[in-house]
Amino acid sequence: SNFPKLIIQGEISNCKHHSTGHLYFDLKDAAAKIPAVMFRGSQSGLARLPKEGDQVTVKGALSVYPPHGKYQLIVREMDFLGVGELLLKLEALKKKLHGLGWFDQDKKQPLPKFPKRIGVVTSPTGAVIRDIIHVLRRRYAGFQLILNPVRVQGKEAPGEIAAAIEAFNQYDLADVLIVGRGGGSLEDLWAFNEEIVASAIFRSRIPIISAVGHESDVTIADFVADIRAPTPSAAAEIVSAEKAQHLQNLKKSGEALHAALVHLLNRYRERLMGYARHPLFTSPYTLLGNAMQRVDELKDKIDHLITKQLEQRRLLLEGKAQALVALDPKRVLKRGYAILFSRKAESVIVSHQQLSPKDEVKALLSDGEVYLTVNEK
């Protein structure tokens, strides 16, 4: 039978690039899907090869594949939905959420001044988490970093990001959250433009810093978050406090207190000396001399107390810095431990129940990574 030409818009799924050069995939929307094939000879006009999750418009015709007796779509042309359509979708959601008041400044939560538990929602293997850890180690002492690993790209990413934020809130796991990923195209960053992520950020009781992409990348998550950081490293700098600055502030406070006390003591000394020179006090000069000696003793005692306080603060900061080094995950790995990741789901394995024979896993060691196959359990 001759079928009419069709123009269909949908999402690529189950995409397979055959060794013959032909493309086999399903074209689906929220309600239905149809198998499709694009033969090698029809692919010359493609800007690139399609991949899982691509939104496309195809032109072709229905056909019956005799061996299976089923209908399939023979695709002659394929166009990827452009950035323009994504921008229209982005603007529509931005307008909706703005109308709901989700971007209002009075809805923003202040960040804690000295957070102890810093939560991070990002990929566990990208440069983002390494940059955040590096900055925090350099700038901040006494913190606990809690990573909830998620996918930051692809159709599963929005749900995982939203669920991670909700988990931090449900179990009260952090004082502040950094939610983000590295840079990329509009399509790469699209998970952070989804309403489900915006809703999780808006409803979070924990203050959230959005750190998506580079400074020029702006997403819906940036508008809803309590603070937007231009990069993940900048987000780590926002939540951290410079150790040297703390010491400098403490030193300045101590010096100011010391100077004020010395000035006050000098004033009293001058007044006492003035009284001592008065004829009325010429005779009892010994009494005044004892008083001035007592003032000197008090001054020395105050100097000692100030020095002792500064030393205690310095030792406290050093102790926290040593604790931070002790908590370094790499130290644990160097003792012979490893972190296992499922190659299929790209998630951390915490239980043998997650594994089955012949499953492939990636083991992260202190000096690299190896790939393993489960033989039996």
Image (tube, rainbow, N blue to C red):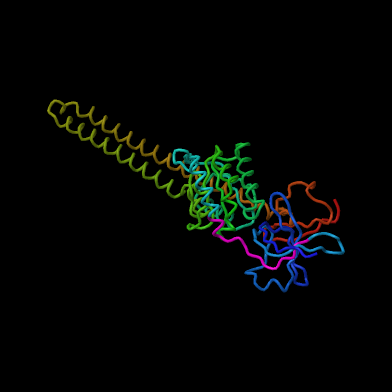
For image coordinates 86% across by 53% down, the residue present is: 376
Q: Which of 245/53 is in front?
A: 53
From which residue to which does the magenta span run? 72-87
Say whether residue 82 is magenta.
Answer: yes
358 on left or right of 200: right
Tell me if 342 is positioned left or right of 230 in this view: right
Whole-percent x and y of residue 319?
Answer: 54, 45
User: Is the residue 256 above or below the residue 279 in the image?
Assistant: below
Place of residue 14 in the rendered image (x, y in percent of width and height, measured from the top left): 74, 59
Residue 101, relative to residue 345: is it above or below? above
Residue 241 in the image, given as x and y percentages of width and height: 47, 47
Residue 16: in sight, yes or no? no
Q: From where the camera sits, is residue 311 visible?
A: yes
* Quadrant of the image containing the N terminus: bottom right
The quadrant holding residue 189 is bottom right
Query: Is-magenta flag for residue 79?
Result: yes
Q: Is residue 334 left or right of residue 185?
A: right
**Camera-side residue of 339 and 167:** 167
